[in-house]
Every structure is written in C-alpha cells, then in structure tokens.
Amino acid sequence: MRPFWALRPTGGPGRASRCVGPAGPASFWSMAYWLLKTEPTTYSFADLERERVTAWTGVRNPQAQENLRAMKAGDRVLIYHSGTKVAVGVAEVARTAYPDPTAADGQRACVDVRAVSALSAPVPLGVLKQAPSFAGSPLLRQGRLSVVPLSHEQWRAAMSLGRGPTT
C-alpha cells in the first residue's frame, strides 16, 4: 500500500475531494458537505437544535432525492433558511438514506440530521454569491434545489463567513 501522501485526490458531485489508493477510498477523507434548505416558518434551525435529531422528510425533487441518497453518516450539512435566504447553522448526517415515512408511494428517501451548532454570524445568500468558491455552484444555478452538494472550498468559505466549525 502506498503511503498516504502518495494517494491521488478524487472527487465527485457532493463529495469532498478524497484520496483513493490501491485498496479503495481512505474513509476519513471522504466526508462530504451539503446544504439543506428549509422554510423557517415550517421547520427552522432552532427547531432542529431543540429536537437535536430529525428525519429530513418531504423532499420530492428527483435531483434532491439523488443527493439525499448520496449522503453518508458524518457528512457535514449547512442549514439554509430559504424564506430569509440566509445560512444559519451546521448539522451532520446522523443516518444514511432510508425510505421516507411521509411518502405515500414509498419511493422517496430521507436522512436523519443532527444539529451541531448555530453559525455565529448568519450568512446571507448575497454574501455567498460574492464568494469566488461559489461561482457555478448549484446553490446559485439551481435556486429551487433543496439539497445542494458543496465542495470543501465552499464549505470552508461558508464557515469562515459564518465563523462556524471548519471541519
């Protein structure tokens, strides 16, 4: 097996760059970053903090469903309030995709999300738009997508702007 510094970086939609060696991916490098949108009058980050863990249900868009199914336990999540267009908190995926209990057809998936911390300074969409790392992001290109993959650079930029945890 090659030493860790000889592994080659890879990446993909919603996945942070990770290292892959001859034996496969190095799991501690494979954390991904996501942005989940929610309407604060329906379910806010404060609700998530109070409940600590919740099932992220009701996602109908096929691309958002694909993103939900790609989430892994331990992935970091930026919670974004769509009504006020501001990123407000950090969470993590607590349970990988499973059948959404609210879906009548049984075809949709959901994940469990655990609150980590509120951002010290909420980050408005206008500020994210100005960050160079967000150029071309699905957050800006597909405004109605409710489950958005973030690159490691986008995550670090958002955490820097919101003074949140960078890992």
Image (cartoon, rainbow, N blue to C red):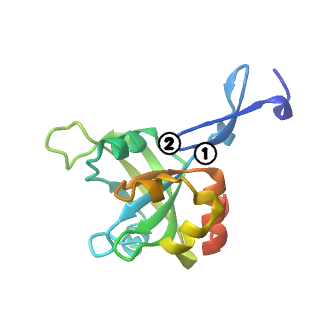
> Badge 1, how many Cα within 10 Å: few under 14, some, many 20+?
some
Q: Does the CB distance between marks 2 and 1 fall below 8 Å?
A: yes
Q: Is residue 146 visible?
A: yes
Q: Which residue is mark 1?
A: 31
Q: Point out the image quarter for the C terminus.
A: bottom right
Q: Is residue 146 left or right of residue 162?
A: left
What percent of the width, then of the height, locates residue 20? 70, 28
Residue 124 is at least partly visible in this image: no
- The location of residue 61, given as percent across then percent down, is 29, 47
- Secondary element at tag 1: loop
Q: What residue appears at the point 47 percent right and 43 percent down from the top-left corner?
A: 71
Q: Residue furthest left?
A: 104
Q: Which mark is residue 152?
A: none
Left or right: 40 with respect to 25?
left
Q: Residue 18, image x and y in percent?
A: 68, 38
In space, the residues marked 2 and 1 are separated at their CA atoms by 8 Å
**Residue plotted at (45% across, 52% down):** 148
| Camera-nearest residue between 11 and 104 | 11
Picture coordinates of residue 101, whole percent (x, y) = 22, 46
Query: What's the residue type where badge 2 is placed?
Result: Lys
Residue at the spot x=47%, y=52% of the render? 138
Q: Are there few (<14), some (14-19), or many (20+) residues within 10 Å of tag 2?
A: many
Query: At 60% from the left edge and 50% from the top edge, which residue is drawn?
Result: 151
Q: What's the residue type where badge 1 is placed? A: Met
Toward the bottom, the furthest residue is 121
Tell me the residue that label 2 is attached to.
72
The image quadrant where one finds the N terminus is top right
Q: Earlier in the sequence, mark 2 or mark 1?
A: 1
